Amino acid sequence: MNSRPRRELPEQLFAAAQAQPNIALVKYWGKRDAAFNLPVVGSISITLDSLWTRTAVRFDAGLAQDRFELNGKADAEEARRVGACLDLLRQRAGVSWRASVSSRNNFPTAAGLASSASGFAALVTAGAQALGLRIDDTEKSALARRCSGSAARSIFGGYVEWARGERADGADSVARELLPAAAWPLRVAVAITSTAAKEVGSGPGMRRTAETSPFQQAWVDTQESDLAAARAAITARDFAALAEISEHSCLKMHALALAARPGLIYWNGATVEGMRRVRALRAQGVPVFFTVDAGPQVKAVCEPQALPRVAAALREVPGVLEVVDTGLGEGARAIPAEALAA
Ligand code: PMV
């Protein structure tokens, strides 16, 4: 344990960190253990760059309870999950102080852009730094996973694989970098088709799927070969191969969830039309593919030169409210306090 004797601690322990959301190309859907947040399958994602969460954590001997604010407003709903995540860090450090956590996103929360992934990756990174925990990114990934599954992947940048793992304690269910962002700098156009919070969150959605979808076993059985195909495509920087396996994994995850009882329909009309436009562009030779998570936004991944055409095509889709574009970026990292105001 990296515990420090209490008498050495100053009265406050402060650090700040930034993390970006990630988008899965080979999807995670389903848990093999809810308490440790262990996935039933491995997954592969890309970490984004211009969308971010910046989080400041201050452990303070004088606080009676944890506090959490998001974008300047107290958030009681998320405060529980933040408190549980802080408990894991406190346990590791042997510290009992409560903390004040202030977090800011530069993109809409609950818009299907995985704000929990960047949020909890930033929280674990800032919290570990504030407490002086000497843990590497692999251990941070395991801690972030317990706070929010896909947060395990946002600890790393570029192309990332989160292993299913075999152990009951989850020590081997961690993420690692497959390829740095700069080695294959693809771009992503995110077509936002709704800013409403989703009706069924990913946790309850996964549970319902595992309990009622007749395709659950097929999903689990075919994941290893999908992961191998995506890994090979990334290593070879083979865009066409990555496009094929990513769209397959996305549509397979939705087919699985659609077949739950009652079926989970995460799409709206603009989502479907967006996917069709992306397919039409690719048929014309434009290097682009889509992926869609447990929400209605369409994420179009493309080669850099194709971005203007892809973004313009998505803007024309009726029901698309906005198209946000981003590149691929780094993993979670500590930042100076001054950067929080920027
Ligand atoms: O970790 P969660 O609860 O954000 O679940 C993520 C589920 C998907 O976004 C649909 C797929 C994925 O691998 O990110």
Image (cartoon, grey):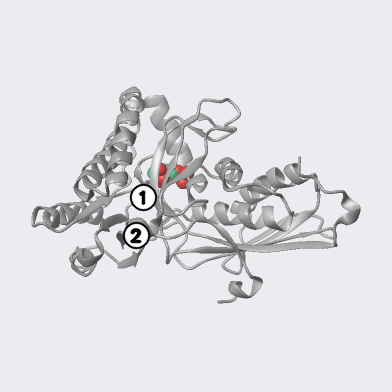
Closest to the observer: 152 or 297? 152
SS under mark 2:
loop
In this rendering, position of residue 330 left or right of residue 231: right
| Label tally | 2
What percent of the width, then of the height, locates residue 316? 18, 67
Sort mark 1 into few (<14), some (14-19) or many (20+) by Cα contacts within 10 Å: many
Q: Which residue is mark 1?
A: 295
Disc 1 C-beta below 8 A from ligand 1: yes
Closest to the observer: 264 or 151? 151
Callout 1, which amino acid?
A: Gly
Which residue occupies 84% across, 58% down? 61
SS under mark 1:
loop
Q: Quadrant of ligand 1?
A: top left
Q: Which residue is mark 2?
A: 194
Kindly report the distance in space between the C-alpha atoms of the residues bearing marks 2 and 1. Answer: 9 Å
Image quarter hosting the N terminus: top right
